Image (cartoon, rainbow, N blue to C red):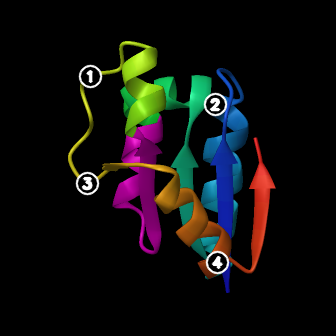
């Protein structure tokens, strides 16, 4: 089973980390997609570290990131478009908006 997290806001760091770790602990795959103000989370080392967990992938909307001066894209995080959001919605069994 795969769960997707659509991250559109600043804040909620502890929720993102806690939900991701809980999902992985239950054996779920996790897709994290950041857009709008949520792209700022790509600059947080604790959020980026989630990619090291088995079954976790991360991507962000490059357009949203550029509008917010987020220019450092972490290694392993795909800088794409709303296409990645569409893929997450297709591939995930459930999607949660954060």
Give the percent coordinates (x, y) of residue 48. 39, 41
Q: Nearer the viewer, mark 4 or mark 2?
A: 4
Label 4: which residue? 90
Q: CA distance from mark 2 to mark 1?
A: 20 Å
> Quadrant location of the C terminus?
top right
Q: Which structural element holds mark 3?
A: loop
Label 2: which residue? 13
**Quick check: 27 left or right of 75?**
right
Mark 3, Cα crowd under 10 Å, few <14 / some 14-19 / many 20+, is few
**Quick check: 98 left or right of 55?**
right
Q: CA distance from mark 1 to mark 4?
A: 28 Å
Residue 71's disc number: 1
Give the percent coordinates (x, y) of residue 24. 59, 70
Which sits in the foreground, 75 or 70? 70
Residue 76's disc number: 3
Which sits in the foreground, 79 or 77? 79
- Label located before the other in sequence (1 or 4): 1
**Range of magenta residues:** 47-61
């Amino acid at each position: 089973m795969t769960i997707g997290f659509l991250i559109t806001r600043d804040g909620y760091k502890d929720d993102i980390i806690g939900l991701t770790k809980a999902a992985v602990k239950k054996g779920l795959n996790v897709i994290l997609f950041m857009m709008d103000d949520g792209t700022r989370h790509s600059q947080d080392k604790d959020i980026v570290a989630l990619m090291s967990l088995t079954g976790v992938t991360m991507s962000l909307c490059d357009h949203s990131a550029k509008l917010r001066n987020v220019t450092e894209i972490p290694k392993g995080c795909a800088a794409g478009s709303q296409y990645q959001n569409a893929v997450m919605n297709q591939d995930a069994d459930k999607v949660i908006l954060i």
